[in-house]
Image: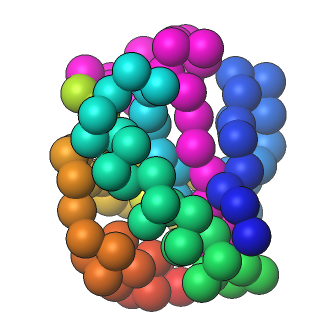
Amino acid sequence: MNPIHLTDKDFSEKLASGVSLVDFWASWCGPCKMVAPIIEELAGDFAGRATVAKLDTDAYGEVASRYGITAIPTVIFFRDGEEVSRAVGVMSKDEYAGTISALL
């Protein structure tokens, strides 16, 4: 299972209900490349229970700006469309999974 790739147009709609993790990233970002396989694993691990998504900050800067993204990777956790937590920089799979599990 792969993460959903969000755009400016579908961002709010895709996160409207349930628990979601959104990885704000860019193709040129080295640490983002380190986080990418973890995000892919989480998408499989939480399939059917939580939304795991990515947003390219270069392509969709409006959403990144709205959430005050100043460093990437930034992972924001949402519940029913509202931000509940965020992590900046590289974290372990267990740390991301623990936050998702706590929100479910």
Give the vertical position of 22 relative to 103 (above or below).
above
x then y, percent, for residue 70: 25, 22
Task: Report the residue at 47% width, 46% height from top.
Answer: 23
Residue closest to the eye, 60 or 1: 1
Report if residue 60 lies within the magenta region: yes
Residue found 25% across the figure and 71% down from its top = 92
Q: From the image, which quarter does the N terminus lie in?
A: bottom right
Residue 103 at x, y = what percent? 45, 79
Please give the name of the residue rendered at 45% of the width and 26% of the height, measured from the top-left corner.
26
| Residue 27, visible in the rendered structure | yes
Residue 18 showing in the rendered view: no
Q: Position of residue 75 (x, y in %)?
A: 38, 49
Question: Vertical placement of 87 versus 8: above or below?
Answer: below
Residue 94 appears left or right of 47 = left
Range shown magenta: 50-70
Q: Is residue 25 found left or right of 2 in the rendered image? A: left
Question: Residue 15: x and y, percent?
Answer: 68, 52
Looking at the image, residue 17 lies above or below residue 102: above
User: Is residue 35 magenta-colored?
Assistant: no
Whether residue 6 sits left or right of residue 99 in the image: it is right
What's the residue at 57%, 34% (across, down)?
Answer: 55
